[in-house]
Structure formats: structure tokens, C-alpha cells
Amino acid sequence: MDPRKDVIEERLQGIKRIIAITGGKGGIGKTSIATLLALKFAEKHKKVGLFDLDFSGPSAHILLNKKKFDFPEEENGIIPPTVHGIKFMTIVDYTKENPSPMRGIDVTNAILEILAITRWDKLDYLIIDMPPGISDPALDIMKMIKRAEFIIAATPSKISIPEVANTIKFLQNTKKSIMGSVINMIFKGSAQLEEKLEELDVDVLAKIDFDEDYEDAVGNIAKLRQTAFAQKIEEMTKELPFRK
Amino acid sequence: MDPRKDVIEERLQGIKRIIAITGGKGGIGKTSIATLLALKFAEKHKKVGLFDLDFSGPSAHILLNKKKFDFPEEENGIIPPTVHGIKFMTIVDYTKENPSPMRGIDVTNAILEILAITRWDKLDYLIIDMPPGISDPALDIMKMIKRAEFIIAATPSKISIPEVANTIKFLQNTKKSIMGSVINMIFKGSAQLEEKLEELDVDVLAKIDFDEDYEDAVGNIAKLRQTAFAQKIEEMTKELPFRK
Amino acid sequence: MHEWALADAVLKSSQKVAEKENLIEVTDIFIKIGELQSINKEIFRKALEATLEQQSDTQLFKNVSFSLEIVKAELKCNDCGHKWLFDEAKKDLDDTETESIHFIPETAHTFLRCPKCNSQDFEVVIGRGIWLEAIEGEN
Amino acid sequence: MHEWALADAVLKSSQKVAEKENLIEVTDIFIKIGELQSINKEIFRKALEATLEQQSDTQLFKNVSFSLEIVKAELKCNDCGHKWLFDEAKKDLDDTETESIHFIPETAHTFLRCPKCNSQDFEVVIGRGIWLEAIEGEN
Ligand SMILES: Nc1ncnc2c1ncn2[C@@H]1O[C@H](COP(=O)(O)OP(=O)(O)O)[C@@H](O)[C@H]1O
Ligand SMILES: Nc1ncnc2c1ncn2[C@@H]1O[C@H](COP(=O)(O)OP(=O)(O)O)[C@@H](O)[C@H]1O
Ligand SMILES: [Mg+2]
Ligand SMILES: [Mg+2]
Ligand SMILES: [Mg+2]
Ligand SMILES: [Mg+2]
Ligand code: NI
Ligand code: NI
Ligand SMILES: [Zn+2]
Ligand SMILES: [Zn+2]
């Protein structure tokens, strides 16, 4: 019998809200949304954690410009290190940015292990940065953290609409709480996507333009905070779903 | 004993070259490269197959504007339907674009099943469109199709460089054949990425600019063929690795 | 019929095992058919026999007999732990859905839900598809 | 020490099982420690005892004894089928690497390779980490 699953709920009990940033495809801004949201909450003196669950391509540390990968402190478990005011768990602290090819079953095991040993303590928000697709990590979070709420990242591209629609349908199937959608990388409007979201009864929380200068801000916290992207995320946190 | 694995080699024996389009992150152009490459070969009267392996977010059919999802013909197995001159296998013909949440073990089983029953017949090229990350599908293709060659999709973004480097290191570890890299979505140069590729001894096969109008061509074959993207892929097919 | 491709796989596998075990003749091939794939026993037997005729190594299989057994498909929800049988679930599937699962059993995750919690995250505990159980022969 | 968190999990799990089985006292807890995680038996015993002292339900565990058994870790390559022992492989790991695997056993895929074909795609057949084998008690 695997003892780890029996301790997860208790490990998370000091956390008020758990928000997973998901969506269909890769490369649509999930990590940017997750990281900027965490930075925003930290700025406002909220207690916030960020958990990068994209084991095959962890990248939140790149946005946060974290370059030293030491083992997190041990104390009756693992204490997440604080980076720019965020309690930040990333597998990179253990893999040291080396390739980490894991099959689904390994991903499930690693998620279970981290959830069982991490002492988040009291948090207002735990933000989870999800990998693309409805695969093991997404299924595991839904299974292991029943009260997780979801923010759906989406781009207006025709290529990405069917997949984001499928992700939403899948979450709705098991009555998961969807906070709303963040539309990212807008060039020439997003009418088709917004229609689809309306049809699926998902609110739009923020609309973010494609920003040619965004890349320059990656890894530079001061610049990142000044991007139009960060501004939109700030506005979003004043929206109804965050005031509940 | 699973009989399917013993028949895969024979099912693929009429195929001269098997090329998998991989890379690290999602959203970097893997599907675009795979699809345009297949279209290009078809234009040149090569016998070409395209296998969309991104079961959680299949999208090659969107680029190809395939909207009817009938079961492929049966004849001692499955005969891939021909779309714009390409023998095209996609799970969408079976899922009808519905959400298909599969764990790693299911993905492995579905790949095995399709490889065991599909009769590609004689092909000059089979192009495989890979999902993001080094997870089950990537590991399975490496395991089940030892002679697969890899094209590495990459973007110059700081966020994507570590992951693409890890994918390359991983392939080199087991001495897989890497044809080279396609750099996509270039805005302001790609010096940092090119340095990394040089360091890892991976050739650059093509450099594709970010194209604001590319999205308009998605799903429109005539327009797609006229994009700068298609032009670059055409040039690429004249390069050494394709003449071998 | 796409069953031919699977029958072919079974014979290739059997031949490989026979070679490894130094059998000069295979007398029996025991095959399990997972109910999930809805493969008809008699159709699969015909597929095996037809494939056999096209095979080169007829000597090895000249007197072979096939034993086919259907295995009930058991599903288990990864979310709530509930167990159920495909047999009960399949009455809710239309023909196209059953046919999809016939071709690619994993599309069960597309068309089936846990009857208790509605989750699509379930495991096929047993009874997925074609399985080569054992072969018998002489050396 | 992060072992405390795992010891805590073992006790929580044992308590849950005890409640389900209507035990009023748990006398023995049998634990297997997969070698891959390099958890020291005596440290884990101390972690269990220390955690026990902080627990509320001391009545249930007042006379419990822990049986700890190390299970050798067996690895199997998904690529070439080769099997090997973590015991043989670990001499090639440096301290940081062993420590990573100690915290998250799946980082074995980061630092280990199949000794035969160099693949990182292998399976931990047995001996991954902490496992609650059984509990005994009175009702
Ligand atoms: N609004 C935007 N404008 C310009 N580039 C963006 C924007 N949002 C994200 N990007 C870029 O797109 C890529 C993917 O973003 P990321 O946040 O990593 O998405 P995901 O986590 O979904 O893969 C990155 O290179 C990032 O710099
Ligand atoms: N060179 C380019 N210029 C502009 N947009 C692009 C370019 N290449 C890809 N895209 C867009 O980026 C997104 C991801 O492309 P896609 O080919 O689906 O990548 P992947 O398969 O790696 O996820 C799509 O919306 C596509 O339209
Ligand atoms: Mg990401
Ligand atoms: Mg793709
Ligand atoms: Mg399954
Ligand atoms: Mg493993
Ligand atoms: Ni059939
Ligand atoms: Ni320790
Ligand atoms: Zn259920
Ligand atoms: Zn090996």
C-alpha cells in the first residue's frame, strides 16, 4: 500500500486556494500566466506558492531568473525555497536542468512524492503550472487535488481552438471548477475563440496581446513586472473569481 | 505475450525513411514543419505518409483542412486515407475530435496498435508529428522504430532553449540520428540558440521568420503552399540530409 | 477486415517463439481476445486461417489448431476506484463508438465514463485486446 | 530530515487501515524500503518514533513495533530489455545525484543509464521507495 496518498490532503490543508493553469497546447502562455500571477500575488503581500509541474520542460525558473539549483531545505519534509517572494517548487532543483525522460507512471510517482513531502505551510494561493495536454500530470492533479480550480490559457489560433475546447469539456465532465480563460497572443482579434468560450460557458478573465518585446523581459523580473502582460494579469486579479 | 510488437518492423519495411519532427516545448512549429514537409514531398510526387502522434492535441488535420472523419478503409489491416497526396493517419478519424484523455500506458498501447495494423505500403518518407516533451510517445517511437531520424524544431526564445538542448542530449545519448534543426518563429535573430546548436553539433536546416500572416493560411492549402514557411521547407528538402 | 493484421501478428509472434524454443512443429496456439476490442471469435479464426495460407513457413503450422478465448473487459476508475465491466457499459455506445474502440481500444477513454463519478480517467484492468497466451508444439 | 514526512505518511496510512479494520490497537507495522531511495533503516525508525510522539492518537499505537525491510531495487530497460540492480549502478553516481534520487526517486531517469544500451528509458521493477506492506493489531 502506497502511504503517500494518505497524507496529501493534510499537506495542502493550510492552502486557501489551489489554482492550476492549464489549456490545450504547449506554447500558449501557461508558464507566463502562472509565474506572473504568482509574482503579482507576492507583490500584494499574499502568501503564494508556485509549483512547476512540467517535468519534461520545466521553465518557470527561467522566467524567474533562478539560476542556482540547491536542494530545498529539509525540516520534517521539504521547505520550498523562496524566490522573489514566491515559495517555488521545481524539479530543476533535483535534476539540475539535465534531461529527465519520464514515462507517465514516473510522472505520477514524482508528483505524489513531491506532494507528500512538501510543507507549503500557510498559503493564500498555490499556483500550479501545468504541462500541455490532458496526460498523466493533468489527470493526477484532478485526482489528487479535488479542490483545484482551473484557469484555461488559450490563443486565438485556429490550430489551438479544438484542443482548448476539449480540455474545457473534459474538466466540465467531472464538474471541475473553471475560473475562466486567459486569451493570450492576440494579433488580429480573437472572435472565433471567444465564440467557442461563450458556447462552453467559460468567462474571459483577461485578453493579452502578442507583445514583440515580451521575450526581452523573460528572466528579468523588473522588466517582466512592467510588461503589458503583467499589467493584464494585475487587472485580472481584481476580477470576481479572485475575490471569492 | 503481446503479438503486436513482432509485426511492426514488417509493417514499416516498405518505407525508405522515417523522419520524426520533435523538439522540446509545445507551440514551436512541430506540426507546421511536419505537415509542410509532407505537402512538399507530395508536390514532388514522392510517396509520403504523415502520422500525427499528438493524441492529446492532434492538429495536422487542421492545417490540412481535413474535416470529414471517416474510418480508414480496411484491407488486411488499415489503409491510410490520402489527403492532398499524403497518406495521413490521425487518431481524429477514430475520436471524431472528442477529448481523449490517455495516460502514458494508453498512449503506448494506441501507438503499438496503429503501427501493427496500418499498411503504409511503399513510401519514400514517413513523417511523424510528435507531441511536446520527452514522454511516452517520444520514448515509444525511439524504442519501436529504431531507424527513425529526427528533425529538431526550435525557437529562439530563452524559455525554449534549455528544453530543446535536453531533447538533443537525450537523443544523442542513445546515438539516434539527428538530421538537423529547424529554427522557427524568429523575431530578432537567433544567435543564442544557434550557439547552443553549434555546441551540441546539430546543423541548422532552415531558419523561418515569425510571420504574422501565417495563421491566415492555416487550413487553406493553396495559401499554405505560398507562405514563406513553405518556401523555407522547400529549400530545406534540397539540403544534404535529404539527398542521402 | 483489419483483424487480418492482428492475426498476422499472432502468427509472427508464434513463429518467433517457436524458433526460440526450437520447435519443428506448432500444434496449438492459445489466444485470448479482450472483450473491449469486440473482435468476433469466428472472424478472428478465419483471419488466422487465411493468413496462414499466405505464409511461407507452412511446415511449422501445418497441423496447428487455434484455441480462442474471450476475456471479459474490466475497467477501474483511477479517480474514485469504482470497478465495472465493459459488458455493462457498451449498451450506451453507438455503433460508431464501438467501432472506434474495435480499431483502437484506447478510444474507450474518448467514449466511456466512470458510471459512478463520470471520469474518463480509468484503467483497463484486463480484457483489452489480442493476447498470445501460449503455444505448444514438438521439437 | 525529509524522512519525517514519509514516516508521517506511513502512520497516517496505518491509522486509516486500522480504522477500516476496526482495530483498537496496532501492534505491528511492516514497512518495505525500496533501495532506490537510499533511506537508512535506523533513521527511518527514528523518524517513525519521533512522529509517533507528536501524533494525537497515541492510544492506537501505544505498543507498536516497526518491522523495516530493505528491498533491492531492480531496473529493467524499456529499450533493450536488459535488467540490472541499482546496487551495481549506484557506484557511478556522485553524492548530489544519489541525494536527488533520495528525494525524488524518479530523478533516477536523469542520472542513470542502461549499462547495455545507454537508454534513460527504463522501469523500476521493484524497490522504488517506502511501501506499507501490512499492519497487525487487535480489535
Ligand atoms: N503575450 C505574449 N507575447 C509574446 N510572446 C509571448 C506571449 N506570451 C508568451 N509568449 C512567448 O511564447 C512562448 C511560450 O510561452 P509560455 O509561457 O512558456 O507558454 P507555455 O507554458 O504554455 O508553453 C515563450 O517563448 C514566451 O516568451
Ligand atoms: N513561423 C511562424 N509564424 C507565425 N506563426 C507560427 C509560425 N510557426 C508556427 N506558428 C503558429 O504557432 C502555433 C504553434 O505551431 P504548431 O505548428 O502547431 O507547433 P507545435 O506542433 O510545436 O505545437 C500555431 O498557432 C501556428 O499557427
Ligand atoms: Mg509551460
Ligand atoms: Mg503539434
Ligand atoms: Mg486505460
Ligand atoms: Mg521508471
Ligand atoms: Ni474489424
Ligand atoms: Ni533525507
Ligand atoms: Zn469514478
Ligand atoms: Zn538498454
Image (cartoon, coloured by chain):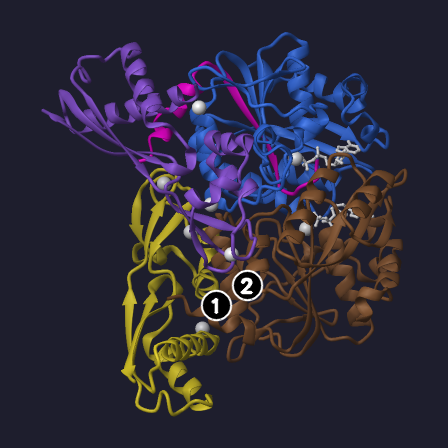
Chain colours: A blue, B brown, C yellow, D purple
Write down the quadrant of residue A70 in the picture.
top right
Quadrant into which the N terminus of chain A falls: top left
Residue where numbered disc 2 is placed? B144
Q: Is residue A27 magenta?
A: yes
User: Which numbered disc flags the more N-terminal residue, 2 or 1?
Assistant: 1
Task: Tell which residue pokes out farthest to the front in this image.
Answer: D91
The front one of D34 and B87 is D34
SS assignment at label 1: helix
Residue ID at (31%, 18%): D46
Given residues D22 and A76, the one toward you in this image is: A76
Residue D46 is left or right of residue B8, and the answer is left
Return the residue found at the far left.
D139
Pick the residue in front: C10 or D53.
D53
Q: Which corner quadrant holds the C terminus of chain A? A: top right
Span colored in magenta: A1-28
Q: Tell me if I can see residue B46 in this picture.
A: yes
Residue A8 on the magenta span: yes
User: Residue at label 1?
Assistant: B5
Q: How many marks?
A: 2
Q: Is residue B73 visible?
A: no
Q: Position of residue C65 (x, y in %)?
A: 29, 84
Across and down, in percent, residue A104 comes to 49, 45
Where's residue C92, x and y in %? 38, 55
Q: Residue at x 33, y 79 (%)?
A: C42
Q: CA distance from mark 2 to mark 1?
A: 8 Å
